[in-house]
Amino acid sequence: MLFKSLGKASREGVVAGIKRKDRDTIIQALRAGVVPKLGLQHIQVGRAREIQELINDMERIADGGSAIRFIIGEYGSGKTFFLNLIRLVALEKGLVVMSADLAPDRRLHATGGQARGLYAEMARNLSTRTKPDGGALTSVVERFVSQAHQEAESKAIEIGTVIREKLAHFEELTGGYDFANVLHRYWDGHESGDDDLKSAALRWLRGEFSTKTDAKKALGVRTIVDDASVYDHLKLMSEFVCAAGYKGLLVSLDEMVNLFKLTSSQARNANYEQILRILNDVLQGSAAHLGFMMGGTPEFLMNTRRGLYSYEALQSRLSENTFVRDGLIDLSGPVIRLSNLTPEDMFVLLSNIRRVMQEPESALSDDALQAFMVHCSERIGEAYFRTPRNTVTAFVNMLAVLEQNPGTQWSDLIEGISIAADGGDDMSDIYDAPGGPLAADGDGDDDLTSFRL
């Protein structure tokens, strides 16, 4: 029987000492079919080689290098889970993480504020080890200022002088002069007790000024974070977090398929050019203490009409190693394809979720887990472990019913569980019949291209 040897595997993933906050976060997220930001280590299974490769990347970034990875997997296969897990690893390694999901109003390149919107979202989600939930930009700036204060006291010099020395090399970087000036203005507000000045400086660093006039009036600087300067500001932020005592910056971007969905080929190509610029900088060693993770579907990567492979320069850099076949793998390239969970991995995953949700004395038996997996296998085949999101959600729902209805038997519930393969987002607008958006793919405005009377 397939599950005969799985008892030992279930015991190897023992989780102890789960905080109530982590437990509640995990349960609420899994029931909603989304990935929790906390407590991932309690339920993680499989993909050990991919995780080790990304850990090596984090160490390279901390040593002054750079890295870029495209995390590719089907909808529901665990891309977001994997990205969040690596995000926690990066925080433990002393890196700062900026993260965001791409959306129609958030992309890498635009002319209508969408790129600045992406940067603002990343800045709001900026995380450190002590503030893993985001909103850590203020604490990073305060850490920089306090370190400058300590250094000034030890050398018996002015704090402003120390700050100028720490930020002197910023003037050599694109946009660095105003970035340094904004930090000076934050210190001026800190010294004078002007909270409005400090707030304005933080707003500028978060990319929340929409006009240069407002920025000049509030801070005396002539530039802002705009659509054309997002990547330059990410490089400045990596330099700044290092100046504040951290080891580097990791930028995590999920839902890259939103670039694939852009109906304007001109808009898509502009975004792919930005990805190419980042990729070249990283591969050529031009970036320091900076890493990128981008999560997307196989269509986003390999579609030769709308995906990254539609841009010839990207296809040549991201194409698969031709020697990878017959079970061989190569994780050294920019693209990491998430391997499928095995049935054994799935069993351990369900065991870990059981351990998080149930007390040991009242926990489901291994027989119940095996029966649940057999039911899922009969309903949707191998998709229950290849794209496990719906399977996990159904399992969490079943445990919730058992917990709230004492005396209910799991055997009475399993046969009534309805589960379907995870088809992901509706792509019918992309793969439409002749005359649909794909056929009308053009270089016009994003919205007008798909306009219908």
Image: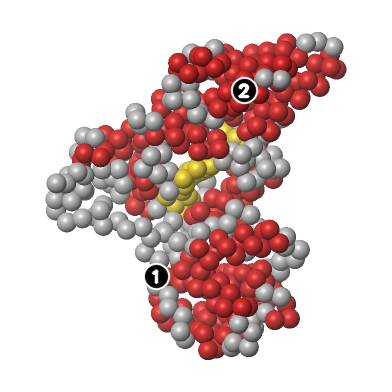
The colour scheme used to paint the residues is secondary structure
Residue under numbered circle 2: 196
Instruction: Tell me the quarter of the image containing the N terminus.
Output: bottom right
Q: Secondary structure at mark 2?
A: helix
* Residue 285 can be seen, yes or no: no
Q: Nearer the viewer, residue 137 or 95?
A: 137
Measured Cα–Cα span from mark 1 to mark 2: 52 Å
Answer above or below: position of 280 versus 333.
above
Q: Are marks 1 and 2 in contact (CB under 8 Å)?
A: no
Mark 1 or mark 2: whose residue is earlier in sequence: 2
- Three-letter residue code for mark 1: Ala
Residue 332 in the image: state x and y as whole percent.
Answer: 52, 46
* Residue positioned 62% across, 22% down in the render: 196
Question: Residue 421, which numbered label?
Answer: 1
Compared to residue 36, the image places residue 264 above or below, namely above
For image coordinates 34% across by 52% down, the residue present is 299
Given residues 178 and 383, the one toward you in this image is 178
**Amino acid type assigned to the residue bearing label 2 in the image:** Asp
